[in-house]
Image (spheres, grey):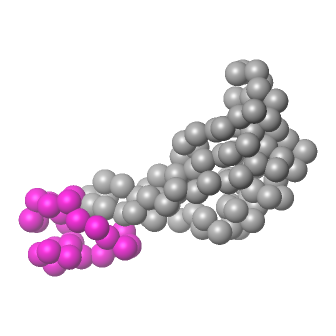
Amino acid sequence: MHEMSLTASLMEIVAETARREGFDRVTVVRLEIGALSHVSPEAMEFCFSAVAGGTVAEGAELDIVRIPAKAWCLDCAKSVPIAERYDPCPHCGGHQLQPTSGEELKLKELEVA
């Protein structure tokens, strides 16, 4: 479960930001997780509650924004939704797709007290 190490790294970023910006408590941690990122939002939620204890984010809400996957089809020159990385284009059936969104794993925002 690589989500545990990702969440531990997230807590390091939150702690460093708290030190740098001078706040003592985080009430909301907002993440963007893309459909192609190979990160399970459910596993991140589970790990967050375990890892946040004893940190400035203890008791904070984890708000996960799920980013759908999209790609640019080089064959038909359209932006198309995809479910998996190697899906064919839903318009032309071509396989020359360049992902344009859905690979994100980003700390988007912190709400602090």
Question: Which of the 4 quarters of the picture holds residue 18?
Answer: top right
Horizontal arrangement in the rendering, residue 92 relative to residue 6 (left or right) = left
Residue 99 image point, x, y percent? 31, 58
Horizontal arrangement in the rendering, residue 35 relative to residue 59 (left or right) = left
User: Which residue is nearer to you in this view: 65 or 20?
Assistant: 65
Q: Is residue 30 above or below residue 14?
A: below
Q: Is residue 104 above or below residue 92?
A: above
Q: Residue furthest left?
A: 76
Residue 100 image point, x, y percent? 31, 54
User: Which residue is nearer to you in this view: 21 or 36?
Assistant: 21
The quarter of the picture where the N terminus appears is: bottom right
Say if residue 15 shows up in the picture: no
User: Which residue is nearer to you in this view: 5 or 58?
Assistant: 58
The span shown in magenta is 72-97
Residue 109 image point, x, y percent? 58, 39
In the rendered picture of this protein, how many numbered marks are placed on residues?
0
Q: Is residue 88 above or below residue 112?
A: below
Task: Report the predominant secondary structure element of the magenta stretch.
Answer: loop
User: Residue at point 20% right, 76% down?
Assistant: 90
Is residue 33 covered in magenta?
no
Question: Which of the 4 quarters of the picture holds residue 74?
Answer: bottom left
Residue 108 image point, x, y percent? 54, 42
User: Residue at point 18% right, 63% down?
Assistant: 73
User: Residue at point 75% right, 33% down?
Assistant: 113
Horizontal arrangement in the rendering, residue 82 relative to residue 108 (left or right) = left
Say if residue 60 shows up in the picture: yes
User: Residue at point 75% right, 65% down?
Assistant: 46
